[in-house]
Amino acid sequence: MALTNDIVKTKLIEKFGDQLSNFEEPYGMLNFEASKEMNLKVLQFLFDEPGLQFQFLADLCAVHYPDNAGRELAVVYHLHSLRENFRIRFKVFTSIQQPDIFTATRLFSSANWMERETYDFFGVNFLGHPNLKRILNVDEMDYFPMRKEFPLEEQSRIDKDDEMFGRGGSIK
Amino acid sequence: MARPVQYNVKNEGGKIVTVGQGPEGYSGEGFFTTKLSDVVGLARKNSIWPLPFATSCCGIEFMATMGSHYDLARFGAERVGFSPRQCDLLMVMGTIAKKMGPVLRQVYLQMAEPRWVLAMGACASSGGIFDTYSVLQGIDQVIPVDVYIPGCPPRPEAVLDGFMKIQELVGSESVRRRSSPQYKALLDSYGIQ
């Protein structure tokens, strides 16, 4: 029998009960959320459970919601079951003051670089990661550029006159 | 059947052949005197070895410039080198990410004096449309640049024009320029010894 969202959801609720929340199915893909302390337990269960076997971490990334007080950063795991050819999305939220999340590198080797990237751009501190340093940006960078408080445009430029871009102001 | 060779060596059509202007000097029967810097400049500017540092679409445009239609070889730049130690002209063509800045700088440092730098296109000159945290906002932040070519990407004609500007610089450069205090100050401003 092919795997469906309902089967996955039922199995998760059997195991974790109300520790999981926010079950959604945008565009037919099952989404759910757990507390950040639970992330490894949930991933391990999804990895091991016969009939699920989500053993491929397709993607790992973060999202910054600056207005979401106390849970500004979402870490999103895209999991794929190669056995069942099935995908789900799993999220944990953390505050931006203490963005500590347990690393998934023990479970998925592919998490190594993806967690480094997520650290690089969002500053999520993956506890237990073997080599948590910047991967794409220059090592000297002293901020996390994908956080919303940092403008996209390069701030070191002094030759750009905002007036030319239809937003008032003049060269500093 | 004779092939229509327009500019053949025998000049059968009787076309006017012009010869480039030589440097100023005194000539007499069997001798010609002129400044050493002019002769050196003449030799250098007509045998520039470019080092293409092509990272994106400007590099494609440069390939067209090297091709038979536009033919950069006409300007004495037939030999495109890929070793910085042998080349005279660093042609930076394309977006340079901040992470590539030190690499570009090292390539520049490995080149022997005299060396020239040409920034081709908006990205190499100013960062172009990539006004963002990851892109170097013009290579003149890490190395001194002699000629900037505008365009996104510039047409091969513009590349040739920029290359001829480099030739002007090379041809008119004083033999003492590279040991002048101004040049030292320029390199010092980039932290280059």
Image: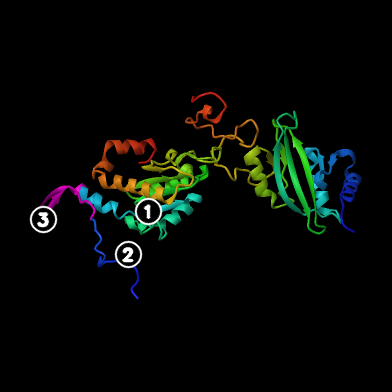
What residue is pinned by disc 2?
B6
Q: Is there any visible trace of residue B55 in the rendered image?
A: no
Q: What is the CA distance from the residue labelled 2 to the residue labelled 1?
A: 29 Å
Chain containing mark 2: B
Chain containing mark 1: B
The 10 Å Cα crowd at callout 3, few under 14, some 14 to 19, many 20 or more, is: few
What residue is pinned by disc 3?
B31
The N terminus of chain A lies in quadrant = bottom right
Looking at the image, tell me whether mark 2 or mark 1 is earlier in sequence order: 2
Q: Which mark is residue B50?
A: 1
Number of marks: 3
Question: Is residue B166 one of those drawn in magenta?
Answer: no
Q: Is residue B2 left or right of residue B56?
A: left
Question: Mark 3: which secondary structure?
Answer: strand
- Mark toward the viewer: 2 or 1: 2
Question: Mark 1: which secondary structure?
Answer: strand
